[in-house]
Amino acid sequence: MSFGRDTDIGYPTVDVKKTVISTQDVAAAENYDVNDVLCNNVSTGIPWNFADVVNGPGRSGKIVKAQITVETTAQAHRLTLHLFSQTPTSELDDNKVNTGPADADRGFYLGKIDFPALESLGAGNSDTLAVESSPTSGVPFEFKCAVGDTDLYGILVTRDAFTNETVDDEYKITLSIEL
């Protein structure tokens, strides 16, 4: 919590933490290659939508922690989450080679978060966590939403090939945000 001075109104400011979750059951129609997109559908994929990450349209925030949980044990691949301030035009379909950020997306591409390898943490799940102490994660991650929007949009990409995928595996991405 920080107590600075808000120069507009003269009151102390407080860092507000907000948790936003986006979940998709990935199609996993076949083995994943390096740089493949992970998404819910092989032909009509959608971006990962992080709804209401800020308290008003066009506002800014900072991601201070990002976590991915996969409902299957023994997952060990590394993932990258590309973030955008509007729906990207890059490849969104599952098991397709990532094309993002495409040239058409550069104006609203915010950057990426690199996650360390997933680890099994007991029965049922594999997890990975990107935090400030992870020097190459890209966290903390400052962003600004598009004018008229309070959401962020993502493309999840694997940095490793893997063959132990399960159809409809649930991937849950949790972002902890300071406003």
Image (spheres, helix red, strand yellow):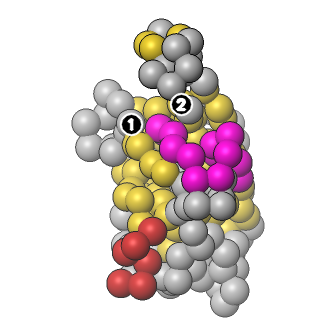
Residue 127 in view here:
no
Give neighbour class at mark 2: few <14, some 14-19, many 20+ (Cα, 10 Å).
Answer: many
The residue carrying mark 1 is: 140
Q: Secondary structure at mark 1?
A: loop
Residue 136 as seen in the image, left or right of residue 33? left
* In this view, 89 is above or below 3: below
Using the rendered view, name the quadrant where residue 30 is placed: bottom right
53 or 172, nearer to the observer: 53
Q: Which residues are magenta?
A: 51-63
Mark 1 against mark 2, which lies toward the viewer?
2
The reply to whether dot 1 and dot 2 touch (C-beta < 8 Å) is yes
Confirm whether the magenta stretch covers residue 54: yes
Residue 115, how many percent across, how many down?
A: 41, 47
Q: Residue at x 32, y 27 (%)?
A: 133
Q: Residue at x 67, y 68 (%)?
A: 26
Residue 49 as seen in the image, left or right of residue 58? right
What is the three-letter code of the residue carrying label 1?
Pro
Residue 179, how many percent across, how many down?
A: 56, 32
What is the three-letter code of the residue carrying label 2?
Glu
Residue 127 as seen in the image, left or right of residue 48? left
Mark number for residue 178?
2
Q: Residue furthest left?
A: 135
Q: Main secondary structure of the magenta part?
A: loop
* In this view, 124 is above or below 167: above
Give neighbour class at mark 1: few <14, some 14-19, many 20+ (Cα, 10 Å).
Answer: many
Using the rendered view, name the quadrant where residue 121 is placed: top right
Residue 134 in view here:
yes
Instruction: Give the mark nearer the N terminus: 1 vs 2.
Output: 1
**Distance between the alpha carbons at the discs numbered 1 and 2:** 10 Å
Confirm whether the magenta stretch covers residue 158: no
Residue 4, how many percent across, how many down?
A: 44, 13
Q: Residue at x 48, y 60 (%)?
A: 83
